[in-house]
Structures are given as structure tokens and as C-alpha cells.
Image (cartoon, coloured by chain):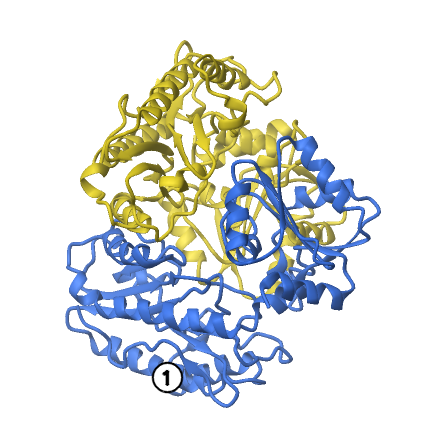
Chain colours: A yellow, B blue
Amino acid sequence: MNKFEKATQYLQELDVDGWLIVCNEDSDVNSPFMLGVHSHARHYVYVDANGQHEVIAVQMEAPMIKKALEKKGINVNVQSYNSLSNLEAILARILTKSRIALNYGENVLEAESTAYADYLRAGDYIALQKLGPKTEFISAAPIIYKLRSVKSSEELKDLRNTCKATMELLVDIPSLVEVGMTENEVRANLEYEYMKIGKPAFPSIVATGPHSADPHHNTSSKKIEPGVLLIDTGLKIDEMCSDITWTYYVGKPTEEFEKAYFTLYESKKIANKYMIDGSPNYLPGLKCRESLAKDGYDHEKLFFHGLGHSLGFEAHDIGERMSWKVPKHFKLKENMVYTNEPGLYWEDKWGIRLEDDIIIGKEKCELVTQVPKDPLLI
Amino acid sequence: MNKFEKATQYLQELDVDGWLIVCNEDSDVNSPFMLGVHSHARHYVYVDANGQHEVIAVQMEAPMIKKALEKKGINVNVQSYNSLSNLEAILARILTKSRIALNYGENVLEAESTAYADYLRAGDYIALQKLGPKTEFISAAPIIYKLRSVKSSEELKDLRNTCKATMELLVDIPSLVEVGMTENEVRANLEYEYMKIGKPAFPSIVATGPHSADPHHNTSSKKIEPGVLLIDTGLKIDEMCSDITWTYYVGKPTEEFEKAYFTLYESKKIANKYMIDGSPNYLPGLKCRESLAKDGYDHEKLFFHGLGHSLGFEAHDIGERMSWKVPKHFKLKENMVYTNEPGLYWEDKWGIRLEDDIIIGKEKCELVTQVPKDPLLI
């Protein structure tokens, strides 16, 4: 079943007439997910419960979308609009249906939210409400969740492929990095390789020395110095992203660093045991933290982020994150994909993070990537 | 005046208590615009009319934001939240103010819209309305427009710098491209150079042969073939993006191509004359089209996009686009920055686009970039 067929089935289950995706300047990743192509100008993807799918795009992008869908053998009526009033008329026709799903999240500030479905912008929402005053709008969260949280065998194949390619490049980092090179140059070298076979899944983090203490450091023009070198990076080849963090050491590692590395490595291994079908999302993080605490690390102070997140078409994909703070009824399912990425950070000093990509298994998880047991030295 | 001081002044003029930017997974570019750093997790930037500015971010990103603001000498209280209920409490306190500006667009499907301010997601909007039932929310469009549409002298300096660097690389394309290389490889080579000095402003379009007929072609693994090679690309070094399209020819150009190139080049030059302060946005495009028509090109069929768009912190920046279809009262202002990018496309055959970046001047425009008068051959 292609994605449109799957979505159609979910629409019927929800008793909804259609799913309308509004996308403008890449505002909704569900558009490229469905279409197989990135369209930048304002466009609409309408997935119809009866299979009368439509795309409404500008003239300069419609042929490209048409070709992408034809290539996948998906039957969609791709039409172009040449003015906003023309667009309004087409949308008004679609909005004569009684129940339409839109990509907005509910209770986004609550623990039990569907914030993951919140793509539609407020102004667009208001405009659609005005155009279809009698239409009942519901959140498309259940559709998005079903389409994207548990991965298909093709997606898992893509994942293994992109992860393998990423690891092959990360192993080579020591031969690529020299003291005096900037963080930007290291990133450029790595992403250059990505772009030849795919594209960066997100802007890589290259953090030297104290920069490694900021988990989301913005790669800069600072020169690589002796000490910690943290690289958090991901590649996207076909449909799936990798997201991997390796922490290297430039020069001879201190005992302090080595101890942190080995302890973190072991704590991550323990977490893996709980990354199985039916396991609650909070458990792997809790077990990891117990292990860190046992080894004398104040995890509440030093490890101030979740253990991992769902991975897929986007680096941060659909599905509840994995953290000891997640309510207990959220559970992992077979063939979900998660990162496992504990870290320890000493503000303004240095930090360390080890991140692998993992497929949740029935009895045990599949380690799609594996950080080195011993830190790679540069 | 720094950006926070400017924004404060606009808030006072609008008689608004504050401006709240909600950003999650890079959903609102006004956050990095104000902070000078990209924060990825859910965070809030609150610009206060009385100067009591706040940022609310997760613990893993707060120190990084703090450092970025300190570096710019901007005084903002950066606090971190450790749970959603904690976040809600902080937001509820801010929402006790009576009038708050939010980044949503009004009348986004009308010609007279403020769609450019539409960043806030519907679910977030609903959540804020719930948290501040007595708060009056207004669109932040006037603030965003004032902050970002007319560029400062520092921004124009950044623009000239990034444009110069981009052109130096585009001149070298013929020595870099070989028949048999893929579009992805060409893009990788170009963006590799970008990443050493800045970053790609957007994913470059590299379109060989018939791919050039799709103005927004997604760069692919297709091998470069003899014929048209269209490259639409941009670099961001500091605050400003370049956005340039050069159309090359692999091999000996056909007469048809040469005629199109020269005609398009001349039509673009004519449009430049009208890119001055006070000129209506529709005029440069109209003049360009008149010139194309005079030379025998059916511009309505072959040139099916606007002439240009505002350029700045983003490749598609704030300000009405430049197109013969824009209502007549929209006017260009001195120190706005626009692209001038006419194109001609023959579906499934080939296309050509020539794009320069231009500063609107008092008496005449400044050509910050210049496409070659004769097509570069590969």
C-alpha cells in the first residue's frame, strides 16, 4: 500500500471526509512525506477518503509534483492556481465536505498533547475556518501518528542504509580533522560527503572544547583545539534520517574524560535492554540514570535532557520522546525507531554525548548504529 | 540601536505590552533573528515594551542563548523550564499583560494579507488563548515588517559581502563541473565552499537538461548532460542571504538558447530601471514582460512566476513580492532588497532563469550581483 492508500484507510476508520495539508515555505513536512518532492510555494495536499486526491500548487511547481507522484504510481489530480481568488474557489469546493482533518495539535502545553501534529499556522487555520464555516475540522494527529510512528520494512531498510553510510564517515573523522581547522570546516567536510549521496538530515553540530558543554551548540568558526570534540550529525538518503553523536578526543584523553566515556557507554547499553515492544517510554532513561548515579554522577545536574527521541522522515520524528519524565502509559512499539543518547555536561567546561539509532524489537532492540567502545582519538 | 531596542520602540508606537515569539523545531525564524542563535527545542522570546525582556528555554539550550545575547550586549532574562507545568506558569504570568503581539498572519488568502507574519502554529495559538483568556492578542505583522523589510546599513554590508563570495564561486563552476558528475555532486562541491565560510541559504537547485524546466527542481542523482545547466543557489554568512541563479550551457549552445539568454538579460536590465524608491512593486515585472513580448516570447505561458521577492535574513524575506500581479499601491522603498529573476521555461524541454540581488535605491538601484552578459560555457 502506498502512503495515500494507507492514509485513505485511516480516514475511513476516523469517519473523516479528507485530510488537508497546508504547506508554505516548507512549513509542513507531511507534504514532502506524502508527495516525495519538496514544494516551496504555498500548496495544499488533499487526501480524500474516497480516493479523489488533489494537490493544488502554483504553476511553477505543479508539473514537478505531478511527475513525482506519477513516478510512485499514485493517482492524484494535480492542479495549479494562478491567483489567490482562484485558490480560494478550489479550497471552498473542498471545504463543502463535512469533516476535514487538519494538521494542528491539541493541548500542546499538556503532557497528553498531540503537539507533534501542530504544523498548520494560525493565520491559515483562521482562513480555512472562514472559507468553510460549516465544515467540522478535526486534528489530523491520529492519521499522522499511524502513518509515521511505526516504521514499514522499506523505511527500516532505508534507515539501515543511511546509518551504515553515516558510520563509515564518522570512523574516518580522525583522518579528516586537524588541529587548527575550524568547526565549520569539519562540518563542511562531513556534509560534503553527505551531499554526494543524500543530504544532511539537520545542521551538524561540531563542538570543540567548552562548546561541547552546550548540547545544541551552533557550529562556529572556532578552531578545533586539544580536548573534547563532539559531533552530532545525521544523513538522509531516501526516506529516513540517521542521527548519531560521537565524542572524540583531540590529544591524550584525561582520566576524567575516559571515566565519563566508559560510564556513559555502559549506561547506554543498560538502557538498550528496555528498548523493546511494550516497554514504557520512561524506563530506558530511568535505568540509564540509575546506572550513572551508581557510578557517582549527579545525573539530574549533568544530564539535563531526555534519553532519546523518535527518528524517521525527520530527525525529530513522530512519537512520544523517551525520557524518565514521560507519563507511564506511553509505551514503545515494535519497529518504532529511537535514538539512545545520554550525555554529561559540565557548563563552560566540556560535555560528552553518545548517540545511537535503534529499532524497537519484539524481544530485543536492533542497534542500527554503534558508537565506538573506546573513544576515537585525533 | 539593537534589535530588541528597535522592537521595543515599535511596541510602544503600537501601544502593545509585548511581543511573544513561540518557536519549536525552527518554526519561527524571528527567534534566531532576534537571538543571534538557533535554538531547536520549544522556547519563547518575549520582547517587552518596557524593556523587561525574557527568554524561556529548556535547560539544555538556555546557557547557549544567554551567551549569544551577552555577546551582543543585549540585556534579557534567560530562564529555563524543567516541565510543561513550569512553562505554563511562566507563560501565564506574561499573559497577565493586556495586549500581546503574536506572529500570526491576517487574511492570508487575500491580496492584502500579512501572511508574512504567519509563523505561530494553530495549536500554540489555541493554547495561548486558553492560558490568557483576558489577554488581547494582535498580529505582530507591523513589528516584523518594520524590523525586517527595510535593511540597515550593517545588513546591507553583510549582503554585499555574502553576494561577492557567492559570485566568486559561481564564476568557478565551469572548472568544477564535468559531464558525468551528478547534480548532487555539483551541489555538494558548491555548498562545501559555502560551509567553510557560512552556510547554504537554502538547498541549491542544480538542474541539468529538462530538469531546468522545473523552476523549483529538487537536485537529484541525475548526471549532468550536454545542454542547459541551471544553478539557483544562495549563501548566508552573517545576517543576510544571497539568492542567485545562473544558467550555464554544457557544450556549444544552440541559437535558441542564446537568443533566450540575451533577451532575458536585456529584459532584466529594463526591470532594474524601475527598482527604485517609490516605484510600485508591479512595475519592474510589467516592463520586463513588455520587453519579452516585444522580442516574441509568450511571457504568460513561458514566464509563469513573479519577477522577484524580498531577500534578507531569509532567502524569501519580508515584503510584498515583485510581480505584475501585485496590487498597485504596494511600493518599493529605499534599502529594501529584492531579487530580479525572470525566467523562460519550455515544459519537459529546458528552462532558463537569470537572477540577481538588488538594493532599491533613491534614484537608481544597486546591483549587488551581476549575472554574466554571455552565458558561461562548460
Quadrant where the N terminus of chain A is found in the figure: top left
Closer to us: A203 or B197: B197
Q: Residue at x 53, y 47 (%)?
A: B65
Quadrant where the C terminus of chain A is found in the figure: top left
Image coordinates of residue A169 in percent, x first then y, are 24, 37
Write down the chain letter for disc 1. B
Residue B59 appears anywhere in the view: yes
Residue most extreme to the right:
B134
- Going by the numbered disc 1, the residue's amino acid type is Gly
Closer to us: A59 or A347: A347
The residue at which mark 1 appears reads as B296
Q: Residue at x 37, y 27 (%)?
A: A354
Residue B306 appears anywhere in the view: no
- As drawn, is A250 to the left or to the right of A356? left
Q: Residues within 10 Å of mark 1 (few under 14, many from 20)?
A: few
Q: Residue at x 32, y 48 (%)?
A: A183
Image coordinates of residue A94 in percent, x first then y, are 63, 49
Image coordinates of residue A117 in percent, x first then y, are 59, 37
Disc count in the image?
1
Q: Residue at x 44, y 58 (%)?
A: A61
Image coordinates of residue A17 in percent, x first then y, are 64, 38
Q: In the rendered view, would you say B168 is above or below B275?
A: above
Q: In the rendered view, would you say B1 is above or below A227?
A: below
Q: In the rendered view, would you say A299 is above or below A168?
A: above
- As drawn, is A321 to the left or to the right of B203? right
Residue most extreme to the bottom:
B363
